[in-house]
Amino acid sequence: MKYTQLGRTGLKVSRLVLGTMNFGPHTNEADSHALMDDALGAGINFFDTANVYGGGENKGRTEEILGTWFAQGGGRRDKVVLATKVYGNMAAGGDAWPNHDKLSALNIRRAVDASLKRLQTDHIDLYQFHHIDRATPVEEIWQAIDTLIQQGKILYAGSSNFPGWKIAQTNETARRLGSYGLVSEQCLYNLAERRAEMEVIPAAQEYGLGVIPWSPLHGGLLGGAIRKEREGGTGKRSSDRLADTKIREQVQAYEDLLAKHGIEPGEAALAWLLTRPGVTGPIVGPRTAEQLESALRGVELELSDEVLASLEEIFPGTGPSPEAFAW
């Protein structure tokens, strides 16, 4: 496994991040534990979750599964850089009691304690804001985070789904207050969805944030969707997207290119992300051991200049701001 620093920190993390959103809803506890053992055995030390994972009446279930895995001992917790998130409504029915969601100091304090209990640990390495909170002053958020750092409950703070301007505002406020600021941004970014290159990734690089792309296969579209469609195994989300003629033509050209070079589509999508400036490592959410093995091969895959140039032709980026929309 290859490792890198998380943004401007001294924290070393694997270049593949184990996403756990499927643990509980799609992968039972025993199989989830096996996947985490396999990931750790392969050198993946960066695990990502969120307090709301589990969904519906089972919100928090994913963190509980990680907690029972940590409780088995064997150095599991010490070897893992643990990331979770706060923001979402934790009410099973969807109607949160006032102050039981978003980023008020009260909810951050409550959410951290609840996550620590479910995770069966005394600290969270990377505590991420799952979304921007337009109603809470950034000063209040940093006051809450700095208190938690002083208490030893969290070590670093990161963002998720933040626009570029919010990354700048959040870290400039942190600088004014003497806080360390955000160290990472988890954003939607892949070959087929490159709008983050306009402002989010440049802002992250300017402020020393590691970029952690989620949905690296774009919901399965970049994982051989047309081939799987022929074999009768494409999910509904990919099928709906392939109904768009332009998208189907792009994906077909993508799969044809990789077939010519003997490369698996999903592995190529991961390898491409690892060539992008600022990217720490993509999040993969395997449901099976086979999917994890494929992701691990993607980390080791080195794409030739010819393949990279062809991928750029098939999925051209938007370009940086302001050129992308101004001139």
Image (tube, rainbow, N blue to C red):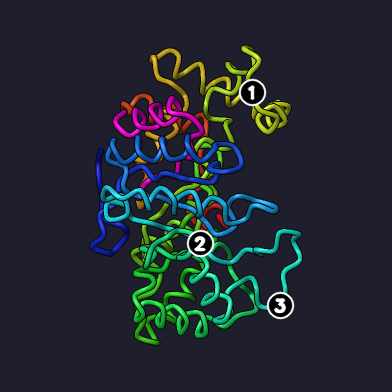
In the picture of the structure, the residue carrying the numbered disc 1 is 234
- Left or right: residue 309 versus residue 225 is left
Please tell me whether residue 3 belongs to the stretch shown in magenta. Answer: no
What amino acid is found at the position of numbered circle 3 in the picture? Answer: Pro
- Mark 3 touching mark 1, by CB under 8 A? no
Sort mark 3 into few (<14), some (14-19) or many (20+) by Cα contacts within 10 Å: few
Q: Earlier in the sequence, mark 3 or mark 2?
A: 2
Element type where label 3 sits in the image: loop
Element type where label 2 sits in the image: strand
Image position, residue 300 (x, y; %): 29, 31
In the picture of the structure, the residue carrying the numbered disc 3 is 98
Q: Which mark is residue 144?
A: none
Q: Earlier in the sequence, mark 2 or mark 1?
A: 2
Of labels 3 and 1, the one closer to you: 3
Tell me the quadrant of the picture where the C terminus can be found. Answer: bottom right
What amino acid is found at the position of numbered circle 2 in the picture? Answer: Lys
Q: Is residue 34 above or below residue 47?
A: above
Image position, residue 247 (x, y; %): 64, 29
What amino acid is found at the position of numbered circle 1 in the picture? Answer: Thr
